[in-house]
Amino acid sequence: MAVNIVGLLGLVTFYFLILFAGLFSKKFMQILNGGKSKSDTGKLSDIKDSELSNTDDLMLAGRDINYLVGIFTMTATWVGGGYINGAAEATIKYGIIWCQAPFCYAVALICGGLFFAKKMRNMKYVTMLDPLQNKYGKELGALFYIPAFSGEILWSASILAALGTSLRVICGLNDETSIIVSAGFAMIYTLFGGLYSVAFTDVFQLICIFVGLILAIPFMSANKAVTTPYQGEVFFGGKNHSVFGTIENDDIALWIDHMVMMMCGGIPWQAYFQRVLSSKSATVAKVLSVCAGFGCFCAAIPAVIIGVVTLNTDWSGIDNGNIDMTDENNYKLAVPLCLNWLCPPVISFIGLGAVSAAVMSSTDSSILGISSMFTRNVFNKVFMPKASDKTMLWALRGTILVNTVIAMVIAMTVKSVYGLYLICSDLVFVLLFPHLLLVVHFPERANRYGFGVGFSLALLLRILAGEPVLGYDAIIKFPGYQYPEGSDIGVQKFPFRIFCMLLHLGLVILVSFLADLANQKGYLTGKWDILGEYLDSDNKPSTTVIENSCPANQPNKVVPLDGKVNVSANGGQESSTV
């Protein structure tokens, strides 16, 4: 396929505009805040926020995100290329009712705002893993980085792969070039500006997403190859399709399982909590979460409509009949195909800018999120607790570079990236959500013994339940297990993900209670306390948290739950903090 020179020049111009905005984002945000980069209200919490180390300042944009920028950046983080292309693909393949992600992730953001944002922001954590390390210790708490990293890196890879296909269809670029260039631009401004760059460019990118896709829909509908008004039942790709979709009786439990998994599993993501923790206040964090939930839902509407347009298009008369819609692999190309063949060239390139903006806005967020967690919760807390602020800063930048390369390599080499991402979303829901819920709302109900037993058994059960994406059959087959026709790998119709998560939650609470009881009876003390849960004779959950990653030669500021500020004279940590 020949390279489209005009489209390529337009894309390069767009990318350099994004890069410029990212590199000078901190200055732009100061202008938006009236020339101030930090809050200056005289309150104790504001004074503490202004004393963030350089590393934490890069991670959290000085905790200075306001309502406008916050709503834009949180919405843009979720609305990625995979989100847009995936919503259109699900509408084509299964019908609107099975396009669950937009509604579920919107609910996840709203629930995160109502039940998690205020508590997390008031405690002034720096990453999502801070409360987990507070509760379970540095080493055990760092284990949660594995599912968090897996989900975020595969999410980044999936949306980079989505961009590669889009640019191939519209501009004629090969996937590898598209992925490397797009990720490279996002990495450059993230390296130098951190969350300042990511948040400010999200404002521009989200505007591009809404304008580009909404502008394209009337031109698509007006194309003579498209049947209007849209039909609810169509013959498409050699078979009958229902635009709205249907749920068979034996699929109801599966539909509910996916719904709950995405609603609850959509909360424990660092890309989300990075916005919450960077907000000016707990109130701002709560409001922007709820507003972003509605924004994410609205952003999916154009993508779903494009899926409906695809179903109502006679593709046999387009591109001399070379577009084969009997091949389900082409469903994922619905958005770029509609932009390229159903719209005038100018509108097509504007729409391409929208897809590119969606990809960059999500990629930079995910890469910064997982790099922040590694630098603070693994590198600093586990391996180099006395690292200077300068060392931390370079570790963060090095991790951003490495994670970008990993995401690019996965996007270019693994064909089923989106399927792998769904698996990691599954693991986040089963393994991470129960603990985040407990340590934030019910810290006295969990301890290290409950964590060890619950986490291990839940992981084992989830592995034994099988996974069609990875190509292995279930060893534990729940009620309703079925083998699709012609396949030797079955499908769990039982809501086993919900079961695994609830079992995990119950085991943590039960085993923690039994361990506390054994300690009170004198059985789990001294050398028998192998996990060190009861080394503190008071046996109380942590009530303080280190606010930021101070350099080794500066005192650590500790924020107790009573709101008073204590400083350890020797720079050490107080209580059982991270």
Image (cartoon, rainbow, N blue to C red):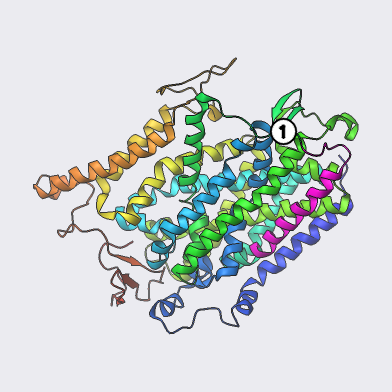
**Does residue 216 show up magenta in the picture?**
yes
- The kind of secondary structure the magenta stretch mainly shows is helix
Q: Position of residue 11 (x, y in %)?
A: 80, 56
| Mark 1 Cα-neighbour bin, 10 Å: few <14, some 14–19, many ≥20 | some
Residue 117 drawn above or below residue 462: below
Q: Residue furthest top?
A: 486
As shown in the figure, which amino acid type bears the numbered disc 1? Gly
Q: Secondary structure at mark 1?
A: loop
Q: Position of residue 30 (x, y in %)?
A: 60, 78
Q: Position of residue 383 (x, y in %)?
A: 39, 57
Picture quarter with the C terminus:
bottom left
Instruction: Answer with left or right where residue 540 lies relative to residue 504.
Output: left
Picture quarter with the N terminus:
top right
Q: Which residues are magenta?
A: 202-230
**Does residue 204 show up magenta in the picture?**
yes
Using the rendered image of the protein, determine whether residue 377 is visible from the camera's viewpoint. yes
Q: Residue furthest left?
A: 521
Residue 301 drawn above or below residue 536: above
Q: Which residue is mark 1?
A: 232
